[in-house]
Image: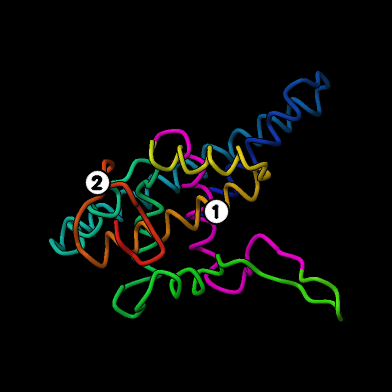
Amino acid sequence: MYEIRRAGAQTKNQIEKNAYLTSKATATLVTSLRGDLAHHKKQATAILKAIRACLQQDTAMQKRFDRLTSPKGVGEITAVTFMAEIPDITLFSHAKKLAVFAGMTPHFQHSGTRTPVSQPISKMGSTRLRQAFYMAALSAQRFNPPITQFAQRLHSKGKKPMLVNVAVARKLLQLLYGIDKHQIPFDPNYAKCGTNNGTI
């Protein structure tokens, strides 16, 4: 699903880059790209329709899906990706272990006796989870008040936007860990959403 969305985004970017040019060849290219974009959208719609039908046939899966989409910023694709990559949350005894599995833990580079250099994330785990939560983090920062406040605190400390989004993505992953583990929907009034101990 993310491959289709990424292809669609790339096609849209190409259209926007060429839309300002006026040559006949460019116009032909843009027309072709628009056809590709329509195809990607049609594929994405068909896949989502199939996913929804599958969920409706399994009450337990539908309930799990509803809980996982309870936080603002976590959409259908993020929740389904989480469910597909993590079929059983009890395989992870701690939220940090899930973050390691997703390759979303801080990474340090060592060079001789020099001080370790911190990198945003290790990128050693599930690529699909990282992609899903990175995109969800962008949305959550706008629409989920507790997450917005968390991001604002990081910005106020001078953190770069990329590092803030990575931290928010990790926070969301920990949040969904708590929701899935305790099988309760997100409570926006809870003071410590998605803390490292897996609570919500």
Under mark 1, the amino acid is Ala
- Say whether residue 144 is left or right of residue 178: right
Residue drawn at the location 33% of the way across and 80% of the way down: 91
Q: Which residue is mark 1?
A: 167
Q: Quadrant of the C terminus?
A: bottom left
Label 1: which secondary element: helix
Q: Is residue 104 above or below residue 175?
A: below
Give the camera-side residue of 113 and 186.
113
Label 2: which secondary element: loop
Residue 8 x %, y %:
57, 43
Residue drawn at the location 42% of the way across and 54% of the way down: 172
- Say whether residue 160 is left or right of residue 196: right
Magenta span includes 93 = no
Report the disc number at residue 187: 2
Give the camera-side residue of 41 and 23.
41
Under mark 2, the amino acid is Asp
Give the camera-side residue of 21 and 73.
73
Report the magenta stretch's main SS.
Answer: helix
Residue drawn at the location 48% of the way across and 38% of the way down: 141
Q: Is residue 61 above or below residue 5?
A: below
Residue 133 x %, y %:
48, 54
Residue 171 x %, y %:
45, 55
Magenta span includes 128 = yes
Toward which corner of the image does residue 176 lie, by quadrant?
bottom left
Q: Is residue 13 above or below residue 110?
A: above
- Say whether residue 142 is left or right of residue 124: left
Using the numbered discs, state the Cα–Cα distance from disc 1 to disc 2 in whole angstroms: 20 Å
Residue drawn at the location 81% of the way across and 18% of the way down: 22
- Magenta residues span 117-143
- Say whether residue 80 is left or right of residue 108: left
Residue 58 x %, y %:
16, 63
Image color mode: rainbow
